[in-house]
Image (spheres, rainbow, N blue to C red):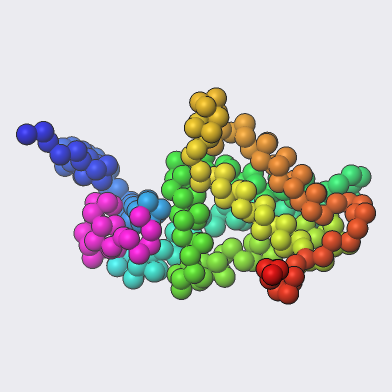
Amino acid sequence: MPSRARTPAQAARSHARGGAAAPRPDRKQAILLAAERLFAQFGYHGVTIRQIAEEAGVPLALVGYYYGPKHELFHAIFVHWQATAEQRLALLDEVTHAPPRKGDQLRPVVEAFVRPVLAQRASPEGEYYAQLVARELARQTPETQRVLVEFFDPLAHRFIDALHATRPGFDRTLVAWAYQFALGALLHHISDHRMPTLSHGHAQAHDPAAGELLVDFITAGIAALLPVSPTTRRRAPSSSTTRRQA
């Protein structure tokens, strides 16, 4: 009878038992990474603390010891990735605080919005985090709302304000729509795997060269919605204008 394939966590434990000099793993970090992987693959509500402990190769009680209840462990994943958000804001500060230059400043804002996220996605952990963000933050749950309010909404407002500064003649609500559309393109790019199929094998998912295309696409899309010299004054849709017409 063929032996059952071992998980990476089981293989790591077996390797550790085989050599007395094996270094002690960082069990707190192992728990965080295991939770990130499982939440990304199966969803927050599809994973138990016991499964996280088994994936991390640690005793069940250790998960609660380090992180408390499951919702705090979920929250800790986003705390762990705050360095990327800080990098995006640092790049944005460089753009917004730089001496005035000729030409449109829209593209540098988009670069600050996109580039750190693509670098994060290319990291060893980045694939699971990208899947987690795309999968879970679209759900309206207490766990995700806490993360959105604490981490993502302040970041979004900073970028909306920066975009608005490049197009001060437009209503900020319309700029917020532009941000939402840009965010949709970015999230889809970092979480989707269909490019090999869609390109008939001529392109790979998350090809680094596609980053420049993504920046071009988002910049052009925002510029189309918020042109430098609008011929007509476009207004953001309101609740009355978005109702379906009979």
Residue 6 appears in which quarter of the rendering? top left
Q: In which quarter of the image is the C terminus?
A: bottom right
**Residue 125 locus on image (x, y percent):** 44, 45
Residue 132 appears in which quarter of the rendering? bottom left
12 to the left or right of 100: left
Q: Label the magenta part by its dominant secondary structure.
A: helix
Residue sticking out furthest to the top: 202
Compared with 27, 197 (above or below) is above
23 to the left or right of 2: right
**Residue 67 locus on image (x, y percent):** 35, 66
| Residue name at image x 80 percent, y 60 percent | 164
Q: Can residue 44 be seen in this view?
A: yes
168 to the left or right of 241: right
**Residue 215 locus on image (x, y percent):** 70, 42
- Tally the numbered discs: 0
| Residue name at image x 56 percent, y 48 percent | 188
The answer to whether residue 138 is magenta is no
| Residue name at image x 28 percent, y 63 percent | 49
Q: In which quarter of the image is the N terminus?
A: top left
Q: Is residue 79 visible?
A: no
Provide the residue span drawn in magenta: 42-63
| Residue name at image x 70 percent, y 68 percent | 245
Residue sticking out furthest to the front: 246
Instruction: From the viewer's side, name the closer residue of 25 and 50.
Output: 50
**Residue 154 locus on image (x, y percent):** 64, 66
